[in-house]
Amino acid sequence: MTAEVNFDGLVGPTHNYAGLSLGNRASTANAGAVSSPRRAARQGLAKMRLLAGLGLVQAVLPPQQRPDPVVLRRLGFPAGTTNTDVARAAPELLPIVMSASSMWAANAATVSPSVDTADGRVHLTPANLCSTTHRSFEPEQTARALRAIFADRTRFEVHDPLPAAAAFADEGAANHGRLTTAHDQPAVHVFVYGRDADDPVVAQRFPRRQSRLAGELIARSHGLDPARTLFVRQSPVAIDAGAFHNDVVSVINEGVLLAHELAFEDRAALLDGLPGAVVVEVPAGLVPLEDAISSYLFNSQLVTLPDGTMTLIAPIEVDETPSTAAYLAAAVADPDHPIASSHTLDLRESMRNGGGPACLRLRVVMTDDERAALGARVVVDDGLLDELGSWVEAHYRDELRPEDLADPQLEQETLTALDELTAMLGLGNLYDFQR
Ligand code: SUG
């Protein structure tokens, strides 16, 4: 059977609040706050356990090594430079090289399932993430991890990330969705972008992270049918209100597009391009854009359960925001609304950095054979979730303050933890320090 597999980014041991993402209002608002890597990782594992318990196929992606020695060398530091050395030599770089931002796996890559590609293989392109400094360090390790997991070249192709230039700026699956009657059927691919290469330079409140060209290049390299790809501009109003990725204001699952009324610039063109889709637009009169962005209603995971109904996996902030709580209750009560049920989760550690349920997952639709060909033990069951839980308890700190990022112990703890993790997940010598 073909299934949508949700790969969640495992929160790394350096999870912290450094205020690194302009345009991501939660990130800015929580700069300098004390984080809890352990609680963050527990919350992430609880989400994976919930989805697996609902009968969905759930998998995990490993965190990245921080600081990354390859990045430090490229920044001109000598081999053997530690986090403590960086703190002494260039304190302003420390939060940037220590960020655990790879946990938001929706930005790891853009994925096209085999049913949609010309060569019948699954194609993945790691996102270059060149719009933010700290995230621009992710693509190399992402590519390495994806190549270890999707190692079978007869079934999978992991492309190189696009070059890290503004014209190719790519944020991965957070700005991409596939609309289809069922996961195993050919889909219309919707690529959402914030700017075009020839946009006039005008003053804007917040950066437009995704370029149209990036989506076009990826669609071509994946061998998607041009007649079934759509390029849609995000509304500048939404970006300037804090929707730095489109998955903050819309979500697609199979034949359903759930979106805020102000998510897209040209709604009419979008709706014309999606014949047969069930488009549920949430009016600003019911859910103001501000509430959509602070609660992350649309950053929920809309998933199809084994019984064929759809459930919404939402952050607890949706319950706590009157307009979104009312919208969701009414949706579930309405037999004609595609959301038949919902679950809310405490993901506050990630949410404080602007990462909700949908940010934490990368969707890969796979056939049984493709799943059986995965090159590592990444599909979770209760046993693996228990092992990961014990691993987090053993290695993660309860609290991390900004100054702790310079602690020499922290880097050592991280390496010990990652070394154990690669053995647990059968990932071989994934990390630079293991080579
Ligand atoms: O890229 N936050 C991430 C959140 C990513 C959310 N992903 C999706 N919407 N799919 C970002 O802005 C904050 C890190 C800090 O400030 O410490 C950060 O990188």
Image (cartoon, helix red, strand yellow):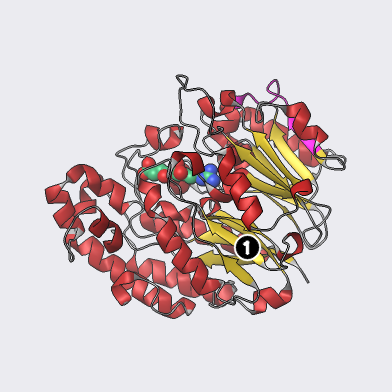
Q: Residue at x 59, y 72 (%)?
A: 379
Tell me where residue 152 appears, x and y as whole percent. 59, 77
Give residue 234's quadrant in the image. top right
Residue 331 place in picture, x, y as percent: 77, 37
Report the magenta residues as a range. 279-289
Magenta-span inclusion, residue 329: no
| Residue 214, placed above or below residue 77 | above
- Between 106 and 189, the one lying in front of the other is 189
Residue under the point 37% across and 36% down: 30
* Nearer to the camera, 78 or 87: 78
Viewer-proximal residue among 350 and 343: 350
Q: Quadrant of the N terminus?
A: bottom right
Residue 383, percent across and down? 55, 77
Q: Is residue 384 left or right of residue 330?
A: left
Residue 312, percent across and down?
69, 48
Identify the residue position indicated by label 1 in the image. Answer: 123
Q: Quadrant of the C terminus?
A: bottom left
Q: Nearer the viewer, residue 402 or 9?
A: 9
* Vertical side of 293 occupied by 313: above or below: below
User: Ligand 1 appears in which quadrant?
Assistant: top left
